[in-house]
Amino acid sequence: MNSGVVGAVRRGARSVAWYLKGMLGEDAYEKYAAHHAARAADPSCAAHEVMTEKEFWRDQTDRQDRNPQSRCC
């Protein structure tokens, strides 16, 4: 196969994976960490430490259990 075609297929696959992660919420921790890093200079946010990924997903699950909303599963 031509290396240009292979590169295009790889870029397409990465784009699809990025899209699906966003649709399924799999990128929620990455967004949380980026948001926290962007607000690190804000004194009102400085007291809060960034949660680990495990802590973040546990908190997310607990919040959904306390406040159930319409969801497919």
Image (cartoon, rainbow, N blue to C red):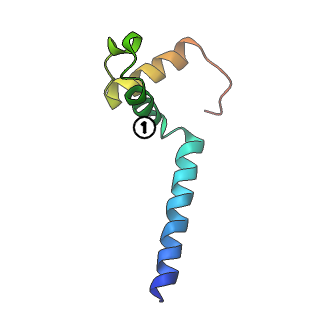
Relative image position of residue 67 (x, y in whole percent):
59, 13
In the image, residue 18 above or below residue 55: below
**Residue 22 falls in which quadrant of the image?**
top right
Pick whichever, 57 or 41, lies toward us: 41
- Give the residue type at disc 1: Glu
Left or right of residue 53: residue 10? right
Pick whichever, 38 or 28, lies toward us: 38
Relative image position of residue 10 (x, y in whole percent):
48, 70
Q: Residue furthest bottom?
A: 1
Which residue is tagged 1?
A: 30
- Residue at the image position 57 percent from the left and 50 percent from the top: 20
Picture mark count: 1
Q: Residue furthest right?
A: 70
- Residue at the image position 52 percent from the left and 56 percent from the top: 17
Tell me the SS state at disc 1.
Answer: helix
**Residue 54 falls in which quadrant of the image?**
top left
| Quadrant showing the C terminus | top right
- Residue at the image position 53 percent from the left and 75 percent from the top: 8
In the image, residue 62 above or below residue 21: above
